[in-house]
Image: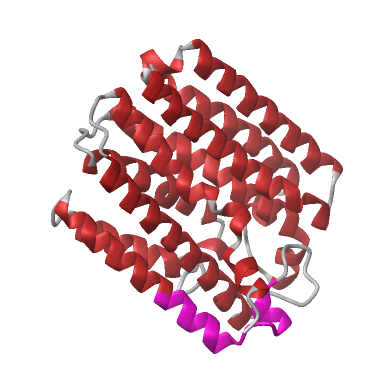
Amino acid sequence: MKLKPWIEAMRLRTLPVSVAGVFMAAGCALASRTFQAAPVALCMLFAILAQISSNFANEYYDFKSGLDKKGREGPRRGVTEGDISPRAMLYATYGTLVAACCVGLSLLVYGGWWLIPIGIGVALGVVAYSTGPYPLSHHGLGEVAVVFFFGIVPVCCTYVLQGGEMGWPITFAGLSAGLMGANVLIVNNYRDEPDDRAVGKRTIAVIFGRKAVRWLYIVNAVVAVLLMGGWFRLTWSSAMQVVWVAYLCGSLGVFGALKRNEGRKLNPQLGITAQLMLLFCGAWAVIAAIY
């Protein structure tokens, strides 16, 4: 078995999206003096496994639906190119999802039975993103799913599992992380718009056009920063303001690259957007620990 196609299928460039939300929650817990390392570590492992499972499912079900073709503009798809058998990818999808669920069950020690319906919802979301009677990614709802499953759910749940209380500040923090994560998908869908349009996959780039989603990228970045305004002690620290500027400048750079480039030349912007999210959320946690 060749390892490289499987690593490509994990889409390592996008994995910072799953990690960043947990960092955001850890920073908020540090700010409210409720930080606990064990549930944070378990939430991070769960998030990574869930995202890998979602990436595997997306590759398998897009292949089965005929939405992927050889030589596509985006990263190489192992199943479509014949590097990975469809059966192996199907087994990997649900095997990874089962592993994520096992990690999730261990979090019952810190939370309680209320985690069960949330875990079931996440598991269904992993699959519903790419398949089922109404695949979310095929009907312009991919970005909405990212905001919910990679922003609000991981940030709020990780925070509460550390002993924090739900409220508007942590909800806004989750929405902030979600908007940053949605920008990763925006770059992906912007790049793939010609291919998706050709096969009838209705992403927001196909529905609203490239110009609209390019501007949505910047709007998301600005709103994501503003949503953190409720955490006054951290938000208005000089260190965090430097991070704000770095994040927004980086986002403007990606915005310009979207306008100038096409196809495979946009692949680096996918990783850069994920790294910008990780920079913001990681710095949030570090600054919270220091201040």
Q: Quadrant of the C terminus?
A: top left
| Residue at the spot 58% in from the left edge and 86% down from the top edge | 86
| Residue at the spot 52% in from the left edge and 69% down from the top edge | 130
Q: How is the image coloured?
A: secondary structure
Query: Is-magenta flag for residue 78?
Result: yes
The boundaries of the magenta stretch are 77-95
Query: Is-magenta flag for residue 79?
Result: yes
Q: Position of residue 151 (x, y in %)?
A: 42, 44
Q: Give the total of numbered labels.
A: 0
| Residue 40 in sight from this viewpoint | yes
- Looking at the image, is 270 positioned above or below residue 46? above
- Judged left or right of residue 251, residue 159 is left
Q: Nearer the viewer, residue 252 or 25?
A: 25
Q: Position of residue 40 (x, y in %)?
A: 32, 45
Q: Quadrant of the N terminus?
A: bottom right
| Residue at the spot 38% in from the left edge and 56% down from the top edge | 45
- Looking at the image, is 24 positioned above or below residue 198? above
Quadrant of residue 256 within the rendered picture: top right
- Looking at the image, is 255 positioned above or below residue 76? above
Q: Position of residue 215 (x, y in %)?
A: 68, 35
Q: Main secondary structure of the magenta part?
A: helix
| Residue 157 in sight from this viewpoint | no
| Residue at the spot 69% in from the left edge and 25% down from the top edge | 249
Q: Position of residue 261 (x, y in %)?
A: 85, 46
- Judged left or right of residue 145, residue 26 is left
Q: Nearer the viewer, residue 70 or 93?
A: 93
